[in-house]
Amino acid sequence: MAKFRIEAGSDVALKHYDPSDTDGMSKKEAREELAKLSEKLRELQTLLYANGKHALLIVLQGMDSSGKDGVIKHLAGAFNLQGTQVTSFKVPTAEELAHDFLWRIHKNTPKRGTIGIFNRSQYEDVLVVRVDNLVPKSVWQERYDAINAFEQNLAEAGVIIRKFFLHISKDEQKERLIDRYNSKDEQWKFSADDLETRAKWDEYTKAYEVALSRCSTERAPWYVIPANKKWYRDLVISRILVDALESLKMEWPPLEEEAHGIEIV
């Protein structure tokens, strides 16, 4: 999965990443592997909880209709929901705006032994805030360093961070928005604001490229996930998460000392 990872200090140009990449795999092959990876993720999540030393934070970002909800739905089928918290970050409330921009993020980070999934994240404050000129440039420019320091602090506290940019093409987004508009069970997701955001595709692309370049670090890396094919998107993310959890080299905790030699009657 190294080809999807952005190395620290790299200058990202999204045109160099193919959103339709499937590495030559068929949907059938991907689904067969995905079933095995989902089983492995369930086992690793249990180990994570049993050890209680680390947490896993999954950050999902992408253009409108890039598939953040779809990834969450897939992961909900792989993880035990009792140990998983999903947080969707929408327009900040009055209370949130009265604090620093990371306040609402920090209080939703996962505790040790659990998994947190962010649908949008702290990066909204260098994306939509930048593109829509919601704060002066002098303000959002400083936020990249603040985000890096924040994520470094989480990593030092035992949080494993994996950040995924779901990369779709503009044509693919058009098809998905049309499907959403025409589907009775999807129309509730459609908003005229989606078209206003779509009109700023180039501006958002540039904002993402800067964020990916400035904020992919050794301990909190960004991955550009080809997301035109939903089945391959889920496969790549699952592979990366299995690798991240296996890198902890967790073992099952032994029987506690006080329990040795007891008789169960």
Image (cartoon, grey):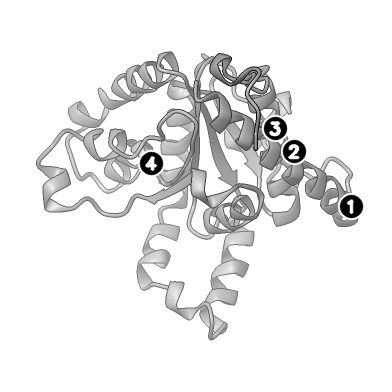
For mark 1, give the secondary structure: loop
Q: Amino acid at mark 3?
A: Val
In the image, residue 70 above or below residue 110: below
Q: Earlier in the sequence, mark 1 or mark 3?
A: 1
Q: Earlier in the sequence, mark 2 or mark 4?
A: 2
Label 2, label 4: how many angstroms apart (C-alpha)? 27 Å
Q: Is residue 214 above or below residue 225?
A: above
Residue 229 in sight here: no
* Element carrying mark 2: helix
Residue denoted by label 1: 26
Residue at 54% in and 32% down: 49
Mark 2 or 1, closer to the camera: 2
Which is more N-terminal, label 1 or label 2?
1
Q: Position of residue 134 (x, y in %)?
A: 20, 45
Q: Does 155 sit left or right of 174 as displayed? A: left
Q: Nearer the viewer, residue 155 or 149?
A: 155
In the rendered structure, the answer to whether residue 264 lies left or right of residue 123 reads right
Q: Nearer the viewer, residue 258 or 42?
A: 258
Q: Residue at 60% across / 45% down in the picture?
A: 167
Question: Which residue is labeled 2 in the image?
Answer: 40
Indicate whether 190 appears above or below 30: below
What whole-number distance in Å separates the C-alpha atoms at marks 1 and 3? 21 Å
* Residue 137 lies in quadrant: top left
Q: Give how far apart the Cα atoms at labels 4 and 1 are.
A: 32 Å
Residue for badge 3: 242
Mark 4 falls on what kind of element? Answer: loop
Q: Give the distance between the C-alpha atoms of the residues marked 2 and 1, in whole angstroms.
A: 21 Å
Viewer-nearest residue: 226 or 101? 101
